[in-house]
Amino acid sequence: MMEFVQLRSFDNYIEANIVLNMLQHGDIVCHLKDENIITIDPFLSPAIGGMKLMVHHSQVARAWELMEKAEAQYLKTIACPVCKSHQLGLVSITKKHKCKLAAFASMVLNGRSVEKRKVYRCGQCGYDFKELP
Ligand SMILES: [Zn+2]
């Protein structure tokens, strides 16, 4: 029986532990998997898919809720690099792959030929960015 499910993965040790602590403060039963391997050899991290955040299956919905809340709160503290307003939000965008080979690889790996990802968008000027400024 699988009691723990993988919620997401991290390449960054510090970020992983911030999220882990935040969830544990919210009474979520969770732990990091493959944490030790990455601490010893960071070059192995991409090969094994990063540190995995494992959450008890009965608390997955609550854990997502807490993570989204924390992220929304964090976003409020960041100013848009273009218009300096504090109205950043997370949105999902769908992008077509430019080359056919990438579209094919995506189809094989993810079961869809388009790329889905999340970007940060400014609610004031509409500016999109992949990484937080
Ligand atoms: Zn803006």
Image (cartoon, grey):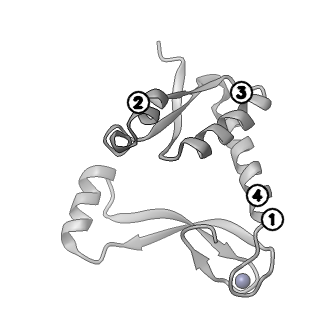
Query: What is the CA distance from the residue labelled 1 to the residue labelled 4?
Result: 6 Å
Question: In x, y percent, where is residue 17?
Answer: 63, 37
Q: Are marks 1 and 4 in contact (CB under 8 Å)?
A: yes
Q: Is mark 1 within 8 Å of ligand 1?
A: no
> Position of 77 compared to 111: left or right?
right
Look at label 1 and name its amino acid: Thr
Question: In x, y percent, where is residue 126?
Answer: 67, 83
Q: Secondary structure at mark 1?
A: loop
Q: Determine which of the numbered discs, if any, sits on residue 43 in the image.
A: none
Q: Is mark 3 within 8 Å of ligand 1?
A: no
Q: Nearer the viewer, mark 4 or mark 2?
A: 2
Q: Quadrant of residue 48?
A: top left
Residue under numbered circle 2: 37
Query: What is the CA distance from the residue labelled 1 to the residue labelled 2?
Result: 33 Å
Residue 62 drawn above or below residue 87: above
Residue under numbered circle 1: 77
Q: Are marks 3 and 2 in contact (CB under 8 Å)?
A: no
Q: Earlier in the sequence, mark 1 or mark 2?
A: 2
Figure quadrant of the C terminus = bottom right
Question: In x, y percent, where is residue 28?
Answer: 71, 27
Q: Nearer the viewer, residue 25 or 40?
A: 40
